[in-house]
Image (cartoon, grey):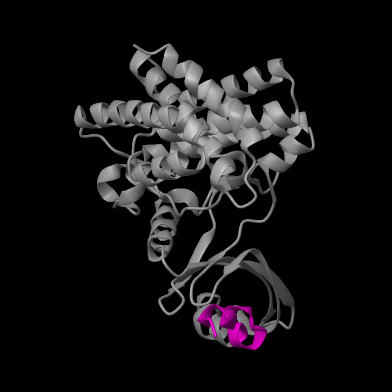
Amino acid sequence: MNIIYQLFDEQFVSELFKDRVLPLYPDFIDIKKIKIRAPKKNIWETTYHVVISYETTFKTRDGKERRIPIYCSAHSEEPRKNVYDALSFLWESGFSKGYLSIPHPLFFDKKFNAVFYRGVRGRNLYQFIREKKISEVEKIIPKAAAWFAKLHQIPAGVAKNYNPENSRIKTVIPGSSHIIERIKEDYPEYKELYQKAYKFFIDKEELFLSQTKNRWLVHGDAHPENVIKMSEKKIGVIDFTDLCLADFARDIGAFLQQLNYMIGRKIGDKSFLEETKQSFLENYLKFSKIKIDGPLQERIIIYYHWTALRTATYFLIKHNAEPGRARTLLKEVENYLKKQK
């Protein structure tokens, strides 16, 4: 039987948490119950990719109960120790306090290749977009900009590259070569576009990185579903699998593109869309204390369109593919490339 099923057994998990979590909380003396659910549950014969939620009720020394959301991210093939290390570094670098937060890392388990962390309670930005709650979106956007600015300002010299493969467009999993081969096989009509687009994006990125020694910690998966409203003042950002050293413009371009895609689909108000994108960019520049110039604007636009291509790729090659949803995104990338010299 696949060993990952042990992490769905309440008794097993309870004993694991008593051993690994209770010592981290001196005020807790026991675990009363654990409610288990799986936001992601991909389990095959011997391999797996899961995200598991444990709503854990602890018993305190004064006889009261305290519920804490604990999450597990486990993968049989991909690294997860890097996620624990990245969260621990960020937690110690100032994301453990103030109104910009992250999940609290708890422990890494080598047996399951799993990272366990205290979850961030709240609703994500995409939910507010989907529900057309414009006032909520307007309040969250500046905080999201501040969060990314704070991340990018951490000196890269004190951090390590937590996911080297993710540092370059060329090698972001599953890799540009793999993607192009898959498109050639399944969607030959897009073969030339993918070849041209990836060559352009990769060449531009490599040129910039060859001209500077600077690198920045980037989230690597910047989009509204990963931004959580925790309270009226506080937000958190989740999912650090892709944290790496790269060009900070990547997070900006990716987030702007995902705002464009999600607000365009769910709200459809073009003026609100442009105002929201402008708010994110202006607040990012304010909090990071930098001025935008032509080269930075170009890099943001490059990563914007690379993200559009990645989103289109997801719809093309996922189970139960939706090529219709990819078509508009690919047309946008095609039009952008036509304007380039």
Left or right of 274 on screen, residue 3: left
Quadrant holding the C terminus: top left
Q: Tell me if I can see residue 288 in this picture.
A: no
Magenta: main secondary structure: helix
Q: Which quadrant would residue 206 be assigned to in this image? A: top left
Could you tell me residue 33's position as x and y percent? 71, 81
In the rendered structure, does residue 8 fall within the stretch colored magenta? Answer: yes
Quadrant holding the N terminus: bottom right
Q: Tell me if I can see residue 322 in this picture.
A: yes
Magenta residues, as a range?
A: 1-14
Residue at 59%, 33% in the rendered image:
326
Viewer-nearest residue: 265 or 85: 265
Image vertical order of residue 11 relative to residue 223, above or below:
below
Viewer-nearest residue: 195 or 304: 195
Residue at 55%, 29% in the rendered image:
257
Residue at 44%, 57% in the rendered image:
87
In the rendered structure, does residue 125 fall within the stretch colored magenta? Answer: no
Residue at 42%, 18% in the rendered image:
337
Q: Which quadrant would residue 191 be assigned to in this image? A: top left
